[in-house]
Image (cartoon, rainbow, N blue to C red):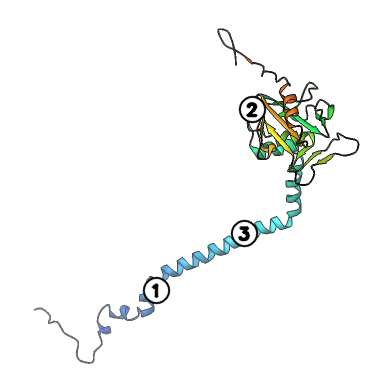
Amino acid sequence: MSEDKVLPKDGDSDYSLPGRYEESNFTYEQQIAPYESTPKSKSKGLAIGVIAFTIISAGFLSYYFLNQNEIDSQIVQNTLNMSPEQILANQYNIGEYGSDHAHAAILVVLDGEQLNFGLPQFQLSGKYIHFEDHNPYLIHKHATGVPLEMLFVSIGLKVTYDCIFVEYGFSKNANEFCTDERKTVQVYLNGEKFPSDISQYEIQHDDRILITLDEKSISKHLKYLDSFKIFDVPKKPLVSSDKDILI
């Protein structure tokens, strides 16, 4: 004989049924807790990350400020250890020594007299561009991208809009030569007036450059400049397996 199923009477609670008691103790807060845990965990992780970044950044800044004088001193020292030529070489990103070889003639006339670059203070003053062999006018360039500024700095020469400065001395009375009012320094390249800053120009083989304050004698100076001999660039022999090749 089977047992009849008995339904709960009125007034009896569902909690009296098997399994209902455990469900009755599962509160609302416990039901929603799993859904709230994810954003809380993300927020907590983000906060920890921000704090960690702040601490690390503060550490780097503290190290810099505590050692600022030493760091700045090292930067200055590294710069001082570089010659003016090397600083300019880095600035202009010039090629390696030997990447080019060109000769050009230059004539600088001050108070009617040629500036003699054959004097010892002007000879072999730089690695990449210089005068040599006591020649008073012939420029030698030994790398690509070398502007005349590198030569001028190495010999103490500066050419501005209306003045020419000679650091190492040319005259016993002055080392600064300027034009009269409303006049400018005259600069010519290959017989044509050069319209911009000649110090930024990179010489090409057989160039001829005139720099003077004397506007009245330009033609005479250009003729004298044309008389200068510019020597050909010597060929370098390259040894091959068969025979020597000249380049």
Residue tagged 3: 57
Q: Nearer the viewer, mark 1 or mark 2?
A: 2
Residue tagged 2: 204
Residue 230 figure quarter:
top right
**Which disc is residue 33 wearing?**
1
Q: Nearer the viewer, residue 158 or 34?
A: 158
Please give the name of the residue rendered at 25% of the width and 79% of the height, measured from the top-left corner. 18
Please give the name of the residue rendered at 39% of the width and 74% of the height, measured from the top-left corner. 33
Secondary structure category for the residue under label 1:
helix
* 237 vs 108: above or below: above
How far from the left and from the top, in percent, is residue 178? 80, 42
Q: Which of pointers 2 and 3 lies earlier in the amino acid sequence? A: 3
Q: Nearer the viewer, residue 124 or 224?
A: 224
Q: Using a 10 Å C-alpha cutoff, classify the residue at mark 2 as few (fewer than 14 neighbours), some (14 to 19) or many (20 or more).
A: few
Query: Where's the C terminus, which quadrant?
Result: top right
C-beta proximity under 8 Å, tags 2 and 3:
no
Secondary structure category for the residue under label 3:
helix
Q: Which of pointers 1 and 3 lies earlier in the amino acid sequence? A: 1
Please give the name of the residue rendered at 32% of the width and 81% of the height, measured from the top-left corner. 24
CA separation in Å, label 2 and label 3: 52 Å
